[in-house]
Amino acid sequence: MTAVFPSSLLGIGIAVKRTPVWSTLVQTSISGKETRAAFQSIPRWKYSIPINFARVLGFSQQTASNEMATILSSFMAAMGQLNYFDYTDPYSNTALLTPFGTGTGLAGQTNQLLDIEGYPIYDLNGTPSLYVNGVLKTVTTDYTISNGLVTWVTNPGNALPLTWSGGYYRRCRYDMDELELEQIVNLCWGNGTLKLISLK
């Protein structure tokens, strides 16, 4: 089971920076004319997440969990940049009748679920609801799903719209191998930043 980034910790700040990243080759001739080539068909996303504070058990009677240990556990389990995990993008995390293609009427049709910005997703948060032309379909009977890829058992009719609703994650890794936190007061750390980057 894929690990999930602990976004719900109280000390993680709301001021998350969210940056789309493209990869483009630009060559400029002596005359100033440019030749450009894209290396990616979709962007990756960088996130900068402030840690305002992370309390240790015993900080106060209201400290119900060891927040510092939770953050460190996530970073250590990922081994810095090595392993990926699921992250709840604060902007793009829920589909509501979001389009992800049209039916072809042909046997064996597959469709990748798309997020609200039109980009592929692979990791779901909960059980999705899939619709063909507004009609709710049943998993196993009408389709199967794995890593966001829908394989239709009952093929959607030609040109019928496909939509879905449900929660999803962004697959990410840490974009850092070091994590620096400052002890603000006894049993409370903070003033750090977690940097993530999404994976394709």
Image: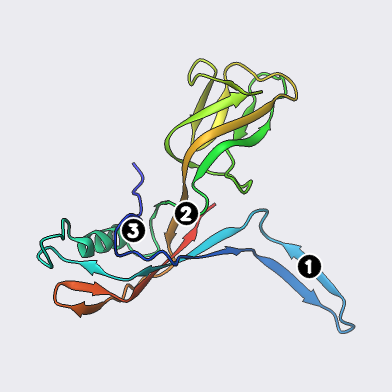
Label 1 to label 2: alpha-carbon separation: 30 Å
Using the image as rendered, state which of residue 152 and residue 159 is in the foreground. Answer: 159
- Look at the picture and state if 7 lies above or below 183: above
Q: Earlier in the sequence, mark 1 or mark 3?
A: 1
Query: Callout 2, which amino acid?
Result: Asp
| On screen, residue 197 above or below 97 | below
Q: Decide: few, some or many residues near mark 2? Use Cα within 10 Å; few <14, some 14-19, many ≥20.
A: some
Q: Residue at x 47, y 54 (%)?
A: 89
Residue located 22% across and 79% down the image: 184
Please report the residue visible at 56 percent of the width from the left and 32 percent of the height from the top. 164
Instruction: Answer above or below: position of 75 versus 108.
Output: below
Type of amino acid at the residue the image marks with label 1:
Arg
Residue 82 in the image: x percent, y percent? 39, 60
| 172 vs 58, nearest the viewer | 58
Q: Which quadrant is the N terminus positioned in?
A: top left
Residue at the far right: name it. Answer: 31
| Label annotation for residue 36 | 1
**Do tag 2 and tag 3 residues touch (Cβ < 8 Å)?**
no
Name the spot of residue 108 as percent of width and height, x first: 63, 22
Circle 3 residues within 10 Å: few <14, some 14–19, many ≥20:
some
Q: Is residue 111 left or right of residue 88?
A: right
Image spot of residue 166 (x, y percent): 49, 36
Residue behind mark 3: 78
Residue at the front extreme, as displayed: 62
Task: From the viewer's side, name the closer residue of 70 and 7.
Answer: 7
At mark 3, the secondary structure is: helix
Give the residue number, with chain letter if any, for mark 2: 89
